[in-house]
Amino acid sequence: MNKLKVTLAVTGLNNTDNPGPGVPVIRSLRESEDFDLTVIGLAYETLEPGIYMDNIVDKVYQVPYPSEGSGDLIKRLEYIHEREKIDVLIPNFDAELYTFMKSSARLHEMGIKTFLPTIEQFEERHKSELPAFGKKYGVSVPKSKSVLKHSDIEKIRDDFEFPVMVKGKFYDAYLAYNEEQVRMHYNKISAKWGLPVIIQEFIKGTEVNVVALGDGKGNTIGAVPMRKQYITDKGKAWGGITLDNKEMLDLTHKIIRSTNWRGGMELELIKTSKNELYVIEINPRIPAWVYLAVGAGQNLPEALVKLALGEEVKPFDKYQIGRMFVRYSYDLMIDLKDFEKLSTTGKL
Amino acid sequence: MKLKKNIAVSESGFVFDPNSGDSFSMNPFGAEILNLLKQEKDFDKIHDTMTKKYDVPPGEFDKYFLDFIQTLKQFNLIENDD
């Protein structure tokens, strides 16, 4: 069978202890029997490991952070597209998604295809909007409140019992046992990710996750539930195992069906001792542990690219239960010339 | 007293609950009882099998068996009675 030639641009090459999904997304697509891939890595930093790993990217371009202005990022993408003729773009950071969704018309004009949630879908699942989301779609969520200024912190005790979770709008989450700890985390998070900072009710239980893909018409193309077995101090999965959990899958189908979710999604859930499931976060993209789904039989990144290309994709109906992953760290040796080239020319 | 039906018990005594992702290691005696529970044997049958096969006073077996079942309940490996 002839493989379809596809030039793919991917961000999130930061395969660190707080990994972006870029490397596992590319690894999944490299295993596709349907695509002959050329991968263009888009890197924000020159030391993102995915830049230098074997058989990951074919070329790399440095791109400006979206916080420097979405115009600069899109302009840079136009420059790269003129040279590389990108077919499909898979952005992998929450913080950049808004820029790419907002520029979807421009990307479409350029001939770059994406498969992203709509702005409405993206906005309504924000951590700060979670209570309204839970009410609208009939799912259990923890009580949450956005904090925009220091003086709001003292009012927390009126609405919450300690401990509470203190979360950034995109990343970071800390448990706080008193007001003083809330202030400390508020300062740290707001300096890094801006405002609001979200205070969330602490739900006691086991954290479980689902990686899923919605086709934008209410259908779930694939979904794999997982439990983190080894969690880093940043709360990231260092090891995990696929589960046979009907309730988690039913909840995922319900959310995708009722929101007509388009694109990749990670549901972060807490399962209480009474087996109740609380949605604590909905990440609007493929998570960094997506390769576990691929290893269990659902190549969701491949399905996402097919959807972006306008192909019909049949939903997956099974996956291997009890499939495990464990991450590792490894010292890559890098040629100084490569580092020099990327640092000085922005391209490798 | 029924073991949840999707619980996997290997010959080595490794137990995996695919619903929660929990896994446990049993000694051969525990694994044998778990396998009897998986075959839906009742207490009398398990009692009979184990006390005939091993040199254990019947009263003592009952005590250890009930402790073991309590542990299985605690780890959510047993179906609810209701």
Image: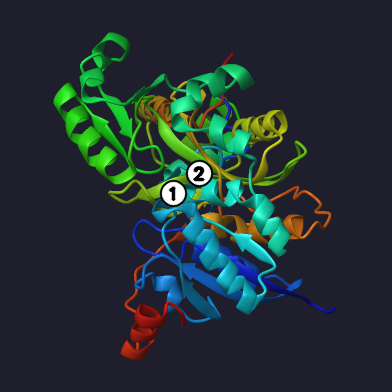
* Residue B28 marker: 1
Using the image, name the chain to which the residue with label 1 belongs: B
Amino acid type at circle 2 is Glu
- Disc 2: CA contacts within 10 A as few (<14), some (14-19) or many (>=20): some
Towards the viewer: A206 or A23 = A23
Quadrant for the N terminus of chain A in the image = bottom right
The residue under label 2 is B32
Which residue is situated farthest in the top direction here?
A158
- Give the structural element (helix, strand or loop) at label 1: helix
Q: Is label 1 in contact with label 2 (beta carbons under 8 Å)?
A: yes
Is A143 left, or right, of A133 in this rendering? Answer: left
* Among the 4 quarters of the image, the one containing residue B66: top left
Q: What x and y, as percent, mark residue A72?
A: 47, 60
Classify A138 as above or below A14.
above
Kind of residue sitting beneath label 1: Pro
Q: Nearer the viewer, residue A189 or B23?
A: A189
Q: Position of residue A293 (x, y in %)?
A: 60, 55
- Residue A21 x, y percent position in the rendering: 50, 58
Q: How many marks?
A: 2
Residue A114 in sight from this viewpoint: no
Rendered residue at 66%/55% (across/down): A106
Q: Is residue A165 visible?
A: yes
Image height of A154 relative to A342, above or below: above
State the image coordinates of residue B48 (x, y, percent, origin top left): 53, 32
Badge 1: few (under 14), some or many (20 or more) residues near its Cα, within 10 Å?
few
Chain letter for mark 2:
B
